[in-house]
């Protein structure tokens, strides 16, 4: 480490050697490298879709409308309306990745906060918060989505809100369970002994020690969120129907799988690769946070 | 310190705990709660304890006697159920929030197992430096200078600042624990079995270090241990705890040379000795410590006492009374004035007979 006092430089409050560890964990593991590279590529493709996409995703070519084909002009073929699939995939990544990352992040922040507070304080706080979470859990998220669309109309933010709503309870329960065991650890009492307040103990002592399963949960739910978004699109309560999303593309191609397999296979493969990439990267992230090196790193 | 100050003027009372109780509620079912049949674990049940400035007070007792709970209650890590705790003449038992934080700076607790008492995700340097920023004592460069100085003081290399707890050895970790306790310059340090997790050579090193730090920083110590040789080596005064109560207290000399309570005697008998010719004479104390939810009536030690006399043992609770008129040495036993000869020849009734013996046969 750089200085002899252990006064490591920090970046937004995170010690830089954590990033070094992360870099080592990713660079030293080809699976993690693959995960990070694919996810980064997909994210870049989504961000720069207007510049990179060879065609307007809405532009139809009537000549090849009825016969989706693979050609040098359309490397991934066209869909049943003659729209370029590669362009639609790039634009679709914006919605799919944005919605899933946004929804799971919101769900994680709200859920983990609830779970940590409930588990740390216990007693009636725990009872009250967890019953609230039970109510969220018992409420069908599809109904929430329909309700939001009915009130606010269709839009990306409503989709994010509905999916985030569905994931709050997963994070809350997981975080609470971890905190229940961590708060009995002696280092929590030791933190109390040096005069650290409840908030400090929760964020400095408890949460960092609960982070590993939460990261895994995060990567798993990203995958489910992409599928949830496609469910909403399929039901017609997702984003606007003509907007391309991976889930919607998958749904549209389903009926044509006999004639034009690529319309559904391409978005399907993209979803699988994204989910795999996020999972592999998540494992590396978990190992990097696990300073004891007990994680299953190969 | 084994060097007892016999100056006439009493040094100031740093910590004075009176009638301290700590009861833990048992986790009960709904029915118990509804019908009010609540049970509590009486971990500490009415203990008086004083620590004078500059002295080391030892608390000994077997596992489950409540000595750790007592240490944690007087240092306000646990909420006391009852009783008063005075630090420098101020009642701290009701402190909370900001007031309590000022106490945290002055009273520090050193845990038995430093590995579990250090956050595995912080470097030990961060753990030691944290109290300085919590109490706004130092920040930035000054903070790390102070931590590095302390590391030098306790014999840790500065390169260890960046180590995580699992990367250090047991002795190094306990030194880190000492650093964290001392970094705020406290007045009172409570040691909970500070060396029992270490091997014997390390024990001596750490105890010497603890002694040296006491002189250097003018600290007062409360030392909790089940190891009588540790207590004898380090302490000025000793309190013997049994089942949440103090059964005997006095100076180290009082307790080790002239033990009066049968439980203290049994504890001392249990120390392994190496002198020739003493083998085979050790009496071991039968039975188990009593239930802390439902302690025995009368003297809490009576079911196991090798000197059980009669119904007054099981019927009346003995109070701490001074031994041989000495002010400092007190023991809680109905039969303090028995002669050695009587003690040696006495054959106590068996535990089952003890239950039958009534109060009427006593006195």
Image (cartoon, rainbow, N blue to C red):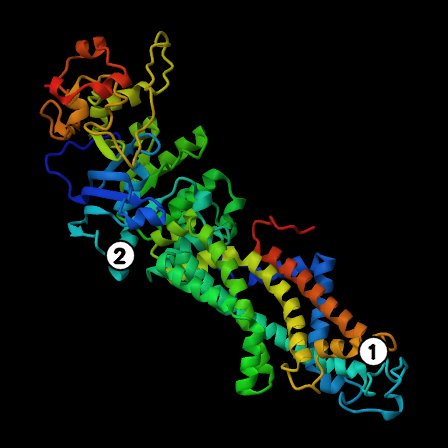
Residue B241 lies, with reference to residue B35, above or below; the image says above
Q: Secondary structure at mark 1?
A: loop
Chain that bears disc 2: B
Q: Which image quadrant for residue B346?
A: top left
- Nearer to us in this view, A197 or B147: A197
Say if residue A11 shows up in the picture: no
- Nearer to us in this view, B255 or B282: B282
Q: Residue at x 17, y 27 (%)?
A: B331
Residue B167 lies, with reference to residue A201, above or below; the image says above
The CA distance from mark 1 to mark 2 is: 71 Å
Q: How many marks?
A: 2
Q: Position of residue B355 (x, y in %)?
A: 24, 21
- Nearer to us in this view, B55 or A248: A248
Q: Residues within 10 Å of mark 1 (few under 14, many from 20)?
A: some
Asked whether the residues under the numbered discs 1 and 2 touch, taking CB atoms below 8 Å apart as contact, a structural biologist would say: no
Q: Position of residue A174 (x, y in %)?
A: 52, 58
| Badge number at residue A256 | 1
Q: Residues within 10 Å of mark 2 (few under 14, many from 20)?
A: some
Say if residue A281 shows up in the picture: yes
Q: Position of residue A53 (x, y in %)?
A: 77, 85
Q: Position of residue A216 (x, y in %)?
A: 61, 59
Q: Are marks 1 and 2 on the same chain?
A: no
Q: Residue at x 10, y 34 (%)?
A: B8
Query: Left or right: B131 with respect to A269?
Result: left
Query: Left or right: B191 with respect to A102?
Result: left
* Residue under numbered circle 2: B100
């Amino acid at each position: 480490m750089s200085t002899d006092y252990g006064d490591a430089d920090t970046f937004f409050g995170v010690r830089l050697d954590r990033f070094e560890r992360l870099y080592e964990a990713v660079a030293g593991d080809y699976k993690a490298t693959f995960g990070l590279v694919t996810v980064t590529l997909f994210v870049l493709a989504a961000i720069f879709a207007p510049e990179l996409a060879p065609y307007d995703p809405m532009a139809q070519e009537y000549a090849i409308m009825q016969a989706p084909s693979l050609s040098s002009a359309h490397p991934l073929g066209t869909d049943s309306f003659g729209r370029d699939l590669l362009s639609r995939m790039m634009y679709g990544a914006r919605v799919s990745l944005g919605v899933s990352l946004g929804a799971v992040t919101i769900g994680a922040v709200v859920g983990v906060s609830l779970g940590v507070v409930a588990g740390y304080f216990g007693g009636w706080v725990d009872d009250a918060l967890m019953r609230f979470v039970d109510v969220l859990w018992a409420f069908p998220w599809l109904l929430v989505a329909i309700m939001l669309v009915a009130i606010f109309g269709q839009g990306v933010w409503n989709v994010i809100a509905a999916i985030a709503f569905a994931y709050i309870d997963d994070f809350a329960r997981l975080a609470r369970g971890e905190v229940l065991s961590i708060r009995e650890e002696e280092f929590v009492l030791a933190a109390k002994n040096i005069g650290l307040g409840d908030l400090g103990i929760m964020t400095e002592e408890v949460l960092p020690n609960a982070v590993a399963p939460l990261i895994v949960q995060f990567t798993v739910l990203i995958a489910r969120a992409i599928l949830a978004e496609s469910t909403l699109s399929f039901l017609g309560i997702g984003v606007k129907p003509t907007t391309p999303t991976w889930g919607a593309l998958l749904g549209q191609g389903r009926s044509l799988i006999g004639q034009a397999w690529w319309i559904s296979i391409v978005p399907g493969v993209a979803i699988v690769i994204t989910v795999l990439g996020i999972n592999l990267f998540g494992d590396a992230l978990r190992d990097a946070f696990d300073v004891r090196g007990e994680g299953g790193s190969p | 310190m084994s060097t007892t100050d016999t100056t006439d003027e009493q040094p100031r009372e740093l910590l004075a705990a009176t009638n301290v109780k700590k009861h833990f509620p048992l986790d009960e079912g709904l029915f118990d709660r509804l019908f009010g049949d609540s049970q509590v674990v009486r971990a500490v049940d009415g203990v008086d304890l004083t620590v004078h400035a500059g002295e080391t007070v030892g608390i000994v007792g077997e596992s489950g006697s409540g000595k750790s709970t007592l240490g944690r209650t007087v240092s306000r890590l646990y909420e006391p159920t009852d009783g008063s705790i005075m630090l420098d003449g101020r009642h701290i038992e009701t402190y909370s929030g900001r007031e309590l934080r000022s106490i945290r700076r002055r009273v520090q607790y050193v845990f038995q197992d430093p590995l579990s008492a250090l956050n595995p995700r912080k470097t030990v340097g961060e753990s030691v430096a944290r109290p300085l920023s919590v109490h706004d004592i130092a920040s930035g460069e000054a903070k790390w200078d102070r931590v590095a100085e302390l590391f030098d003081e306790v014999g840790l290399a500065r390169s260890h600042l960046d180590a995580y707890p699992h990367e250090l050895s047991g002795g190094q970790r306990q030194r880190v624990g000492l650093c964290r306790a001392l970094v705020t310059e406290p007045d009172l340090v409570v040691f909970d079995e500070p060396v029992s997790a270490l091997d014997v050579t390390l024990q001596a090193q750490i105890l010497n270090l603890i002694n040296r730090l006491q002189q250097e920083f003018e600290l007062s110590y409360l030392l909790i241990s089940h190891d009588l040789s540790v207590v004898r080596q380090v302490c000025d005064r000793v309190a013997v705890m049994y089942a949440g109560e103090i059964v005997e207290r006095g100076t180290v000399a009082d307790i080790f040379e002239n033990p009066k309570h049968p439980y203290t005697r049994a504890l001392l008998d249990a120390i392994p000795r190496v002198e020739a010719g003493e083998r085979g004479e050790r009496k071991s104390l039968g039975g188990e410590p009593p239930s802390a939810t439902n302690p025995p009536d009368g003297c809490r030690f009576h079911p196991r006492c090798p000197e059980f006399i009669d119904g007054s043992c099981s019927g009346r609770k003995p109070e701490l009374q001074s031994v041989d008129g000495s002010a400092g040495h007190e023991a809680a036993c109905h039969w303090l004035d028995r002669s050695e000869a009587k003690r040696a020849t006495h054959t106590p009734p068996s535990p089952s007979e003890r239950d039958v013996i009534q109060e009427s046969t006593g006195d």
